[in-house]
Amino acid sequence: MLGSIFARQAGLDDPLRLRRAESTRRVLSLELSKDKDVEIIHESGISTLDIEPVEGRYMLSGGSDGFIVLYDLENCSRKQCYTCKAVCSVGRSHPDMHKFSVETVQWYPHDTGMFTSSSFDKTLKIWDTNTLQPADEFNFEGTVYSHHMSPVATKHCLIAVGTKSSKVQLCDLKSGSCSHILQGHRQEVLAVSWSPRYEYILATASADSRVKLWDVRKASACLITLDQHNGEKSKASSEAASYFLELLCCIVLTANTAHNGRVNGLCFTSDGLHLLTIGTDDRMRLWNSSSGENTLVNYGKVCNQSRKGLKFTVSHGCSPEFVFVPYSNTIAIYTIYSGDLVTMLRGHYSSVDCCVFQPHFQELYSSGRDSNILAWVPSTREPEPDDASEKCLNPAYEDDWSSSSDGEG
């Protein structure tokens, strides 16, 4: 580490390398914060969280009680132990409160003056943060499972909405109406996500086991339907006709499916080059977002018992990058491109439904059915191996954090 600092000061090394190494170290040392608590406001489970991308200071939460709460994550007390207080909330006394569970909240990507929320009450609401009043509202025929605004769009203001209908709705903030509909799924759409790289590319996941990539500018908008088998056909045995027929039926049923169950989680990597999906078949898959190819990274069993959308997240600025996945009442951390399970974060008393990463300080926030929001922060102490045989570093450190590379700096 000291070698990297000296090399950076001498201009012999790229400052980005040191930043990535420190970001990686901080993620690998995440632990439940002993000094930071988040005020308990929700009366039941918390389904969704979002941290605004401008300052990384304010966080929204939405619960199954219909509440929306806005938190200030900054330590305004300047004390070592502090509680992140709720700045304001849309609760039972608010006339425009959602009637049922709030499934998704999202900040407007470019400033904190607006945020959005969608709910099982079949509505998507656009909120003015300053007045805490809805500026606009979209109503749908079925339950709303998920919505998303593009983090990079400059030429459109479309919100993609996944509902109980098999059609993906695109709502235009400028006109206040649904601009057009994307048809192709056969069952309800459980998750939607815009690419962080291309403003017109959208990914959608459905209960029909399919994941589709769309270019919303085109008339036939569907670009790719992801196929877990990458188009390969299994060879049937010529010795048994019954086995052949059974295998053929299997191929037909699983053709162009991303998972062998409902797909209820989507997340692009921070550079937008890959897409992660999670299904109720207890599998997570990594896809090339340009070619649609299954990269065949093996994450092992990823427990997923959720019947609705599952919100997971990825790191930013690390080497390698990590994915944080709700796993029963824990959060599993995997390396994205190798599939290694790094650690499990334990602290919740019930199932975890959502986690969100704060890239400015490499912090993680999680929520679940125990009504708690937990803060996971980098440890302030260095791990000390008990003996020489335990001095092997986590494989994720090897590229940028090994003692040998530090010495060479």
Image (tube, rainbow, N blue to C red):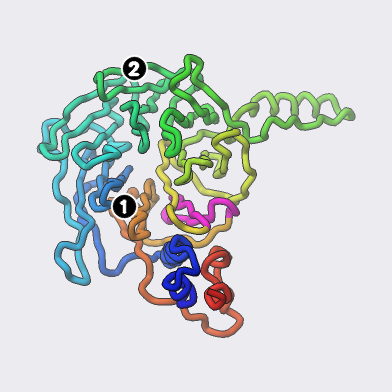
Give the numbered dot on residue 179. Answer: 2
Closest to the observer: 169 or 176?
176
Q: Toward which corner of the image does residue 284 lie, by quadrant?
A: top right
Q: In the picture shown, does residue 74 fall above or below 381?
A: above
Relative image position of residue 281 (x, y in whole percent): 56, 40
Considering the whole magenta stretch, tell me its main secondary structure. Answer: strand
> In this figure, which residue is indicated by the disc labeled 1?
370
Q: Residue at x 39, y 50 (%)?
A: 351
* Helix, strand or loop at mark 2: strand
Q: Is residue 331 magenta?
A: yes
Q: Is residue 177 left or right of residue 9?
A: left
Image point 25% across, 64% down: which residue? 36
Q: Which residues are magenta?
A: 320-339
Percent coordinates x, y for residue 35 in the rendering:
26, 68
Quarter occupied by residue 148: top left
User: Which type of secondary structure does the marked residue at label 1 adopt?
Assistant: loop
User: Against 42, is 2 above or below?
Assistant: below
Decide if residue 236 is on the left or right side of residue 336.
Answer: right
Q: Residue at x 56, y 72 (%)?
A: 405
Q: Nearer the viewer, residue 343 or 320?
A: 320
Q: Do the numbered discs 2 and 1 sit on residues whose CB atoms are within 8 Å?
A: no
Q: Residue furthest front?
A: 11
Residue 205 appears in view: yes
Please name which of the two marks, 2 or 1, marks the residue nearer to the observer.
2
Q: Residue at x 45, y 77 (%)?
A: 2
Whether residue 191 is visible to the viewer of this picture, yes or no, is no
